[in-house]
Amino acid sequence: MLKQGKHLLPAIALFLACTSLQAQEAYKMKPVAIQSRWAKEVSPQNALPEYPRPQLQRKDWQNLNGLWEYAITPAAAKTPVTFDGQILVPYPLESALSGVKKSLQPEQRLWYRRKINITPVSGERTLLHFGAVDWQTTVYLNDKEVGSHTGGYTAFTIDITNAMKPGENTFLLKVYDPSDRGIGPHGKQVLNPADIYYTPSSGIWQTVWLENVPADYISGITVTPDIDKGMVNITVDAPQGYTVAAVAFKAGTEAGKVNGNSGTKLQLKVPDAAWWSPASPFLYDLSVTLLKGNKVIDKVTSYFGMRKISISKDEKGVDRIFLNNKPYFNLGTLDQGFWPDGLYTAPTDEALSFDIKVIKAMGFNTIRKHIKVEPARWYFWADKLGILVWQDMVSPNHSLPEGAKAAFEQQCKETLAQLRNHPSITTWVLFNEKWGQFDQQRLTEWIKRSDPSRLVNGHSGEYLYVNDKLRSPSPNAYVSADLTDVHSYPNPMNAIRMAGKAQVLGEFGGIGVFIPDHQWNMSSAWGYILEKPAALKSKYAIMNQHLQLLQRQGLSASIYTQPFDVEGEQNGLLTYDRQVVKIPFNEIRKIHAPLNPDMGTLPAVAVQDADLTEPAAIYSALLQEYIDGKREPDFLRKLAMMAVQAGDKEGAAMAGDDYFALMKPPYSDDDLRYVMQVTGSTHDTGFSIIRNNMEAIDKAMGARQAAVKMMNLIYQDLIAPAVPDGGANPDWSAIYANVQAYGAPGDEIFLRAKTIYLLNKQDKAGFKPVAKEYLDKYGQFVKLSEKKKIEAFMN
């Protein structure tokens, strides 16, 4: 998704020395503004206990999720002797469910330590598996380095056999995660989250586990169905010189088998195959055995689905997406996979599956998994429940610093290898809205060669329209891809028609509707357009009626933004905590039925319907209670936040001031977050609290949050009103006199505003000295792409 409008302030990060040397006595989830219903079920004894790799299962394994020790140190520090406390793995450091909820800065390193009793088995190997660790990981066992991995979204395995010893073993991890300040793909995570960018997820965020395997073993399988020939192609990754036996089962009964050599393609016939589709997601069980003569060396179980995705012409000669040799409209939604309590990590496996169930229950048949690679069990549930998946590659660093291209390509390679057996995945999405776009033709063709069994969307939203205006031209759009893909906000439109390619609408919608008491940040209700709860259904229905018209004109797919609110974005069809659906299920299914007529059996899910009361009426009732004398702290907080959303700045300031009067330093993290949310002016009492508690706010909310908040308010109140809309030049001396009392934040926003103003005016003579002072003082906080533009104009 693309945020409309310009960001005044860059994403910013500072090193913070923020570690407590006192270990936690017992695990406790950290406070969070809202949480999902599953968070209360999480404990150190049941942290995601399910088998983490459904497509390659063995019986002999040990889950290492649970409490580990953690420490945050400066980058150059040696291995810590004393750790800061305990962290619940696999929930990321910044999440409430981790029990830590601290941000990791680029100048810091995150350490994990855990002691495990192991009994080695003679003749077997022990493998240490990580579902995902963000971003760069070095692994030690008993003070010996045993392996490393770079990339925050894909699994990796380390053979620890030679470093193990009988009895107690000590695992140690060192993690470097610069988020959007690094060269690696980071998705929607940024160190300074706002609008369409969100809180980072550093460190371990998927299951950690041990597995015993034979000395020679099956390390992987590749399964590709061919419904036209009634068979499935299977390649078993195992040492040469062995034979393999693959057997398919249909509802417990043998449905086909084949024997052959390891490392070669085997063709397993599946007579009278049951085809997989969202309406009928039939899965075959698969058993694969590694043999030496008649001796069983290794055995794994898996599954597969018989389905085909292709581009073909319909009866009118229009190129469309076909599923199992028939036109199939991909009615989808843009799922980002964030959770208020776990961030990148769902609280439980039930929660993980819920997201797919609720999307199906709304009548969608497709999910675009947006710039994130989920745990293997998410794709298992997509396969089992029946939903088509468009899988995004995680975008490279948009500025493409040195090393970013290679890191992106490596992550893409690992993603393709890790996910290619899932029948639910029908489409690979290479780039999104020109975010870090490079070598598009080469990479699109590489993906098609690597996996010819799926569609390749080489660029989702290469043509991007906001309010009917094209953001940027693309002279060689959609080269070598199977689809032409347009993004149009808010209203839908068709993509361009090109021979041999299907037309798809990769993103549209983004209707913002806030639901009181179900918001991550009550001072933000961002969406491309904003509607009241009662108006959403009609607006959404009209958009879908236009989709029907576009479908007749050749449109093959649509992706609505989005199923769930995410942090400051409130344009989901459900709230971020998954508690409230904004259009009742039976009504939204009726809206979707013309484009998705064969929904099959839909999952049963339990959520509340939205309260359609006019929000201003809710606020008005609260305000009357205030007038009548109600002053309880929780009431004042809610009143102030509702006032912000109702546009009553005076009411927000009044309620906020009353609440602030009840607060006493030292302020809790929750109090400081509240102050940051409701403070809307340099004149508010909260502004002084922010100014006097900047370090505490940054520790609670992340680096530079307090400074950025102050700078935005200073700009809003003191700089923007003094910059004329016409041709007259601002009185910069008078502006500086007004802002200098605010110290470094005032100085920084003054220099930034003046630099950008003179850059836009193309006033080179005036620009150079101001820009030089700005970069000399604050260049470390400026985005690389922006810094390059400033330096280019200076030179």
Image (cartoon, rainbow, N blue to C red):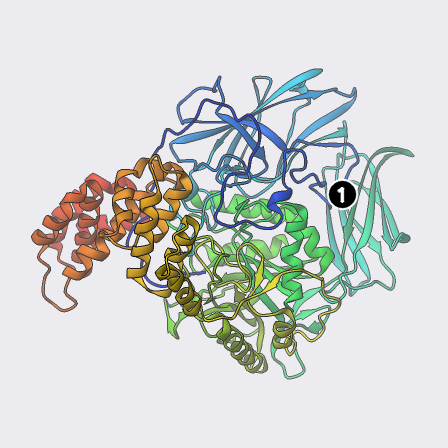
- The image quadrant that residue 208 belongs to is top right
Q: Is residue 446 left or right of residue 671?
A: right
Q: Is residue 200 left or right of residue 390?
A: left
Vertical placement of residue 388 versus 25, above or below: below
Vertical placement of residue 48 versus 679, above or below: above
x then y, percent, for residue 507: 50, 66
Q: Pick out the residue farthest to the front.
A: 628
Q: Is residue 709 left or right of residue 282?
A: left
Location of the N terminus by quadrant is bottom left
x then y, percent, for residue 567: 46, 53
* Along the viewing direction, whichever of 637 and 405 lies nearer the viewer: 637
Secondary structure category for the residue under label 1: strand
Residue 464 visible (yes or no): no
- The image quadrant that residue 149 belongs to is top right
The kind of residue tagged 1 is: Val
x then y, percent, for residue 266: 80, 49
* Along the viewing direction, whichever of 460 and 721 lies nearer the viewer: 721
Classify 10 Å Cα crowding around label 1: few (below 14), some (14-19), many (20 and above): many
Residue that numbered label 1 is attached to = 236
